[in-house]
Amino acid sequence: MRILLVEDDHSLASGIRLALKPEHYTIDWLSDGALALAALKGKEPFDAVILDLGLPGLDGMRILESVRRLGNRVPVLVLTARDGLEDRIAGLDAGADDYLVKPFEVTELKARLRALLRRSQGQASSILECRGIRLDPATHSVSYLGKPIILSRREFTLLGEFLSHPGRVFTRETLAQLIYGWEEDVESNAIEVHVHHLRRKFFPELIRTLRGIGYVLDKEPREKAG
């Protein structure tokens, strides 16, 4: 899951990034409101946004209103020191999906973010299951037919994207954007290597290659021709 963090307090932003790293999220951080709005207007995919309202220059409320006017429905978790009822109502009315008042506990931030992502995908539970595979984001565990499977951080993130959207075709470029942040170098064959490892750890037909297009995890096994 790729998260855009918009927070001008460098100490708080560093703490959030450090806290969320073990959760297998890819975190991109911006401290400037105008740059954040430009990123959200662009073509790069984000699964959710953690947005501070008290930003210098272009504040978070204006970013939120602009994004919603453009029809962008990316889930937004607002972080703010404004704890008045009217402030919370204004943020929710502007299009925020959830509202967390500073200071907050990291465990609550994690839980709210999981719930936000779950609702955005229309899931009652955060656990992802498909074709005998079970992935639990809360415990960072994966199993296949009841047997625990050990995955690297990248493999876990990539598998989570496929299981969240079975039947969806992902281009290699989209997958690279989803599992690698702006500050990370991506080898030209990185996605192919991760896909190969997932197939080896589960079964060869897990992820299907569409030549010249990308990859897809089918909801059901495909019938073999002939």
Image (spheres, helix red, strand yellow):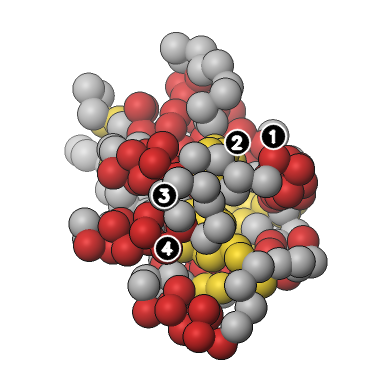
Identity of the residue furthest to the top in this view: 188
Q: Give the residue type that dot 1 points to.
A: Ser
Identity of the residue furthest to the front in this view: 57
Depth check, front residue: 9 or 165? 9
Residue 63 visible to the viewer: yes
Query: Marks 2 and 3: which is nearer the front?
Result: 3
The answer to the question of whether label 1 and label 2 lie on touching residues, with beta carbons closer than 8 A, is yes
Disc number for residue 61: 4
Point 51% across, 27% down: residue: 182
Pointer 3: residues within 10 angstroms few (<14), some, or many (20+)?
Answer: some
Q: Is residue 20 left or right of residue 32?
A: right
Q: CA distance from mark 1 to mark 2?
A: 5 Å
Q: Is residue 110 above or below residue 197?
A: below
Assign a secondary structure to mark 4.
helix
Point 30% across, 56% down: residue: 67
Depth check, front residue: 138 or 88? 88
Point 76% across, 43% down: residue: 11
The answer to the question of whether label 4 and label 3 lie on touching residues, with beta carbons closer than 8 A, is no
Identity of the residue furthest to the bottom in this view: 85
